[in-house]
Amino acid sequence: MVTTDPFTELTLALSKTTLAKMSKHREICRCVDYVIPKANRITLWKFNPEKTAITCLVLYENQVFHVPDNLVLRQDDFPVYFDAVLKNDVVVASDARSNPDTLCFTEGYFKPNNIHSLLDYVFHDDLSPLGVICCEATGSAVTWSQQDIAALKRVAQTTSMFFTW
């Protein structure tokens, strides 16, 4: 994907009205993969209209895309995470298994998938949350840098400007 600035490439891809939604999802994931190399897994999630659930649209791992069937996280099951991500737009959990905002995922998601760190950022339609871009580090924990957070914020902002469901 990247031949010039990855953010410029993402902007150009998302601004194409003829580009299919799945192709846009893939461009977002590829950009995140490039600008946040510590992320081994990248997922793109969509909020329901009430902001009480998110559905996984795509999983990108080892340069392979997967479309999970009915992978939905509900606020009723994970209230602390939903409160954190909706309140702050970002969740930074270098030690995701012990972070208060993400501890709820440890047994059912982090351990089975060997995930140790998580970095999430919300993208919006005007001021309304549309979805979450999620970066995960597998194998061992990583420390997300301010540069990682800023890069993901920029991807989320670009996604917010151009992306429609």
Image (tube, grey):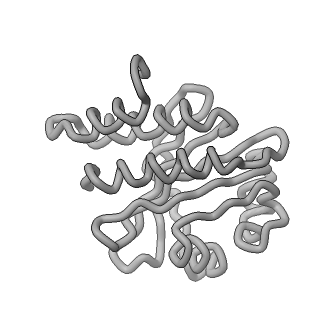
The C terminus lies in quadrant: bottom left
Please tell me whether residue 109 is drawn above or below residue 39 in the rendered image.
below
Which residue is pictured at 25% across the width and 54% down the height? 164
Could you tell me if residue 70 is visible in this image? no
The one of 69 and 141 positioned closer to us in this rendering: 141
Question: Which of the 4 quarters of the picture holds residue 142?
Answer: top right
Image x and y of residue 16, in percent: 19, 36
Image x and y of residue 141, in percent: 82, 46
Residue placed furthest toward the top? 3
Which residue is pictured at 69% across the width and 54% down the height? 118
Residue placed furthest toward the left? 18
Please tell me whether residue 46 is drawn above or below residue 141 in the rendered image.
below
Please tell me whether residue 6 is drawn above or below residue 159 in the rendered image.
above
Which residue is pictured at 74% across the width and 46% down the height? 113
Image x and y of residue 135, in percent: 61, 47
Q: Give left or right: position of 99 versus 57.
A: right
Image x and y of residue 37, in percent: 64, 33
Q: Give left or right: position of 156 versus 87.
A: left
The N terminus lies in quadrant: top left
Q: Give left or right: position of 40 versus 124.
A: right
Which residue is pictured at 82% across the width and 38% down the height? 139
Q: What is the tally of numbered marks visible in this picture?
A: 0
Question: Which of the 4 quarters of the picture holds residue 124?
Answer: bottom left
Could you tell me if residue 136 is visible in this image? yes
